[in-house]
Amino acid sequence: MPRYPDLNPFVSQPNRSSYSTLAALAYHRGGQVYPLHIGDTWLEPAIPCRMESLTIADHPGMHTYSPVQGRMELRRAIAERTRMTGDQPADVDEILVTAGATAGLFALAAAMLKPGDEVLVIAPYWPLIGNAIKCAGGQVIPIPFFETAKDTDSVIETLNRHITSKTVAIYWNTPHNPTGRLIPRDWLAAMAAWATQKQLWIVSDEVYEDYVFSGQHSYSRPFAPDRTISAYSFSKAYGMAGNRVGYLIGPAAVMNGVQRISRNSFYSVNTAGQIAAEIALGRAGQDWVNHARDLYRELGQYAASTLGVDEPEGSTFLFVDVKGALDERGLNGFLQDCAKKGLLVAPGSSFGPYDHHIRVCFTCAPPEVVRQGIQILSACIDQ
Amino acid sequence: MPRYPDLNPFVSQPNRSSYSTLAALAYHRGGQVYPLHIGDTWLEPAIPCRMESLTIADHPGMHTYSPVQGRMELRRAIAERTRMTGDQPADVDEILVTAGATAGLFALAAAMLKPGDEVLVIAPYWPLIGNAIKCAGGQVIPIPFFETAKDTDSVIETLNRHITSKTVAIYWNTPHNPTGRLIPRDWLAAMAAWATQKQLWIVSDEVYEDYVFSGQHSYSRPFAPDRTISAYSFSKAYGMAGNRVGYLIGPAAVMNGVQRISRNSFYSVNTAGQIAAEIALGRAGQDWVNHARDLYRELGQYAASTLGVDEPEGSTFLFVDVKGALDERGLNGFLQDCAKKGLLVAPGSSFGPYDHHIRVCFTCAPPEVVRQGIQILSACIDQ
């Protein structure tokens, strides 16, 4: 049976998102656009981490391939970091450098899942983890989380309601995209103990570990290091999302398996980006993070108070219930009204069954642009 | 059924390759290593294409995300290039920038194939295309090609012997890795006509298009543009393999489908690398290619005459039959003997059923290192 002119059914389904239409609305009207739908930063990276600072005199061969596991210098620096942050100390063979955390989680899903496997995903959830699971033939089982979880008992009760004989893994994310919440340490401990008892893999996405505004980030790997794979990133932490450098840490055998996918899915990670990442783990990068965190905290507080919601505990997002502002056109009508004013926000429906929510990033554009965008959003909600 | 502590069967199979053992042999003995197993270059990129030349003053925001399809400036420059090279002219929506051609072909296989689908692959073949097909659940059907194909009739006869009801696509590669051969224009025309008649997709890997030493490269897309997806790369062409920037060109609907995988498998391509690629398509890049081609041609001729084989027509490789030099230990013994002298070459078995062959890259190291490596290889063969 010829496949031509079709592709496989997974990619042949029509795009659910009509987001490009909204973006066109915002951009084609002229005037300032407020791109609060994107998770990124307006800050340029620390000076020693910029491409213009990386010379072939200092780094001969810096435009040639790196090892598929990542540069040894970078993996050593990451291993060192795990010994300083309260994370589970890792050796270099437990670290796999990936083309952003996105590429790492995709390769991990492909290495771990067989068609029909179910993965519990705390919801609302980052859209790309859903797609990574689906690309591997797996089934996403969203667990309504922050709206139901009150304490460890209610958390475990929720998990128990969703596990089946097909469940092979649980995915969580803290500091949390899109809600800006942290998962408390005692919840994580209980969830890890539960996953251990149920013989599940744990996938913990901690790419916002450096952006905590109140409370403290708890690393997941120490609770169950033999079954936990955590994802980390230089993108958000150091203003280097365009470099596409992140990493996974987990058992060496798992990293070896993931690498057998990743050497095909992206081969190796951009070499200059890895050198920038090594430098970021030094003094200049840490100073940059501390400075950025102060700016981000202030913007997060401004956004929360303007919108009348709780301040973010971490990450760079707020997830806002706009139900009261929806008319018969539903969320899409609301998004259109925003776009006509130049404001782009992400629909809650991208993050699970959240048709009354939107996500805003408060670090995606210079502070004055973010503040104006938040004011426009506030006006749209109060209309 | 818990999966833990296992991964899926595909990645849980033991590694067939013991290559790291050979590399350890070569590197741990001390002294010069001749890494002729790697496909790369010793040349630094053209000055304006180096990371140190890309400033945030010229390119503000150059460390933030690019669009998932690739930067519009780069796609426009690529579209322009297709109008100058004799390739099928492409529009920007027919171009998808990928994290190297590797990542593009992986995402294409995932977008195109269903489990059980068969893909005809002309052999010997680049190992990663085999893995990309297998990762997507497909079956690689190697077609012994250069050893049997004498003219269009014998080519088509070979193809007819391998097609089944499960065949959905054919993959070829010209200039050819690993043999250094070009597929002649009339063969390509016949193969494309045959694939059209059989309703197959065509995947044409042309990443060595710029490295032709005798004869002329023929682009595949003009023969059957509605069903052909071609892969291209800045890695080999411009000495930027570490940047991880390549691209696919094919029908817009296919690129849209592939992008639905690639936005998960690597999200977007390193932004600075894309800017370097744009610059490479200008004058400085073309001068660099012309200079590199002259150096490569001379090295290829030296390698071929020293080893007593035909000169390469293109690419940066020779595929050498070493049957006469094998003892009862087979190819692995030969590779070990080479490694003990510091010489690393790629085993033919990585490229299909070629247990008596090795591949050497004649551009992976400075000319004097390549020449010494080739002399060592020649001595190993004549022993």
Image: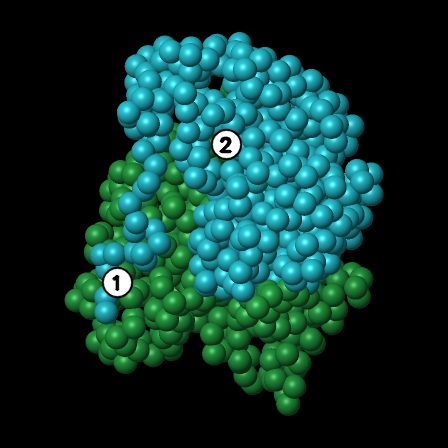
Chain colours: A cyan, B green
Which residue does the image show at 40% across and 57% down from the upper left?
Answer: B110
- Indicate whether B246 appears above or below B140: above
Q: State the image coordinates of residue B267 (x, y, percent, origin top left).
A: 48, 41
Q: Quadrant of the N terminus of chain A?
A: bottom left
**Tag 1 near tag 2, CB within 8 Å:** no
Q: Chain of mark 2?
A: B
Give whichever of B4, B240 is nearer the camera: B4
Which residue does the image show at 77% across and 48% down from the upper left?
Answer: A222
Give whichever of B64, B175 is nearer the camera: B64
Secondary structure type for disc 1: loop
Asked whether, in this view, residue B366 is left or right of residue B28, the answer is left
Q: Chain of mark 1?
A: A
Which residue is situated farthest in the right direction here?
A83
Asked whether, in this view, residue B169 is left or right of residue B69, the answer is left
Do we see residue B174 in this rendering? no
Which residue does the image show at 51% across and 38% down from the upper left?
Answer: A124
Q: Which residue is mark 2?
A: B65
Which residue is situated farthest in the left direction here?
B197
Which mark is on residue A183? none
Badge 2, how many Cα within 10 Å: few under 14, some, many 20+? many
- Indicate whether B231 appears above or below A52: below
Q: Quadrant of the C terminus of chain A?
A: top left
Kindly identify the amino acid type of the residue bearing the numbered disc 2: Tyr
- Indicate whether B117 appears above or below B253: below
Which residue does the image show at 30% across and 78% down from the upper left?
Answer: B162
Secondary structure type for disc 2: loop
Do we see residue B21 in this rendering? yes
Q: State the image coordinates of residue A166 (x, y, percent, origin top left).
A: 52, 63
Q: Which residue is mark 1?
A: A3
Kindly identify the amino acid type of the residue bearing the numbered disc 1: Arg
